[in-house]
Image (spheres, rainbow, N blue to C red):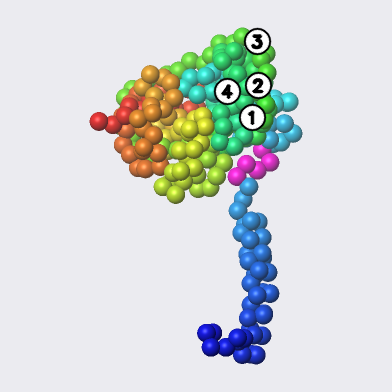
């Protein structure tokens, strides 16, 4: 207090109770906040878990055709029932292993599934295993479009984090994309019924590096759109 070595007796009792109660209160608050959010992944594991709706899930693992452009993708099923899964590794990393030798191959993979809106991601715990050659699925050109929305990473946008989009998530999205996570464009208004589009570059490869400063911001981009099964791919060009 400046003029006394010790606080008054009644104040000492209050401070003692505060010193004992505040840590307990913070501990209880931390437990409540930790239990309140839903698990973004849930029990939807590729081995031993329930499959995503409308997604064929052979056991063990997921079997499909692997392609590498614009990002590693696993195409499960055939025809109109085909579902394309984005692939990633644990954390903010690309899928494990050398996938270049598996391009166009039929493979089996294990991991856990994330899904939100029009996109689903299989987070791999180990490299896929080759089963033999296969025919990659065909792509349908849907013309040129101008779309307003936000550039995100496919892992958090697919429900790996909540909200997983928005300016508050910008730094996380940038780190995920730098680590090799597929880029996603979240459209402000649905495009042909789709709000989440895989974001590729004009040349068919990954997102153009010139778009990196625009991550997490509302932006209007132009480019061609393709349909790959139930997935739309937006080949966006840098503005200007």
Residue 173 placement (x, y as % from top left)? 47, 40
Q: Secondary structure at mark 1?
A: strand
Residue sitting at 45 percent across and 30 percent down?
Answer: 198
Image height of 60 relative to 114, above or below: above
Q: Secondary structure at mark 3?
A: strand
Q: Is residue 22 left or right of residue 217?
A: right
As drawn, the label of residue 74 is 4
- Look at mark 2 in the image and give the residue it sits on: 128
Q: CA distance from mark 2 to mark 4?
A: 10 Å
- Look at mark 1 in the image and give the residue it sits on: 124
Q: CA distance from mark 3 to mark 4?
A: 14 Å
Q: Secondary structure at mark 2?
A: loop
Magenta residues, as a range? Answer: 40-44
In the picture, residue 145 is in which quadrant? Answer: top left
Q: Identify the residue at the far bottom of this view.
A: 9
Residue sitting at 52 percent across and 32 percent down?
Answer: 179
The first of marks 4 and 1 along the sequence is 4
The number of callouts visible is 4
The residue lying toward the viewer, choosing from 197 and 170, is: 170
Specify the quadrant that holds the C terminus.
top left
- Look at mark 3 in the image and give the residue it sits on: 132
Residue sitting at 39 percent across and 34 percent down?
Answer: 212
The first of marks 2 and 4 along the sequence is 4
Q: CA distance from mark 3 to mark 2?
A: 12 Å
């Amino acid at each position: 207090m400046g003029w006394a070595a010790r606080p008054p007796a009644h104040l000492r009792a209050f401070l003692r109770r505060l010193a004992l109660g505040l840590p307990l209160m913070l501990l209880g608050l931390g437990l409540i906040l930790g239990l309140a959010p839903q698990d973004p992944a849930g029990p939807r594991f590729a081995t031993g878990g329930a499959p995503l709706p409308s997604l064929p899930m052979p056991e063990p693992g997921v079997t499909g055709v692997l392609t590498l452009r614009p990002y590693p993708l696993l195409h499960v099923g055939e025809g109109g029932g085909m579902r394309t899964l984005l692939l990633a590794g644990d954390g903010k990393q690309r899928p494990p292993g050398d996938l270049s030798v598996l391009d166009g191959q039929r493979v089996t993979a294990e991991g856990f599934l994330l899904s939100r809106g029009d996109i689903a991601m299989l987070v791999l715990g180990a490299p896929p295993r080759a089963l033999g050659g296969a025919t990659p699925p065909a792509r349908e050109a849907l013309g040129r479009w101008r779309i307003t929305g936000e550039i995100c990473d496919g892992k958090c946008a697919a429900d790996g984090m909540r909200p997983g989009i928005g300016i508050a998530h910008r730094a996380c999205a940038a780190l995920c994309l730098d680590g090799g996570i597929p880029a996603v464009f979240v459209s402000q208004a649905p495009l042909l019924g789709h709000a989440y589009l895989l974001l590729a570059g004009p040349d068919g490869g990954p997102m153009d590096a010139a778009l990196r400063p625009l991550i997490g911001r509302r932006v209007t981009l132009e480019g061609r759109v393709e349909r790959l099964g139930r997935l739309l791919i937006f080949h966006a060009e840098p503005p200007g």
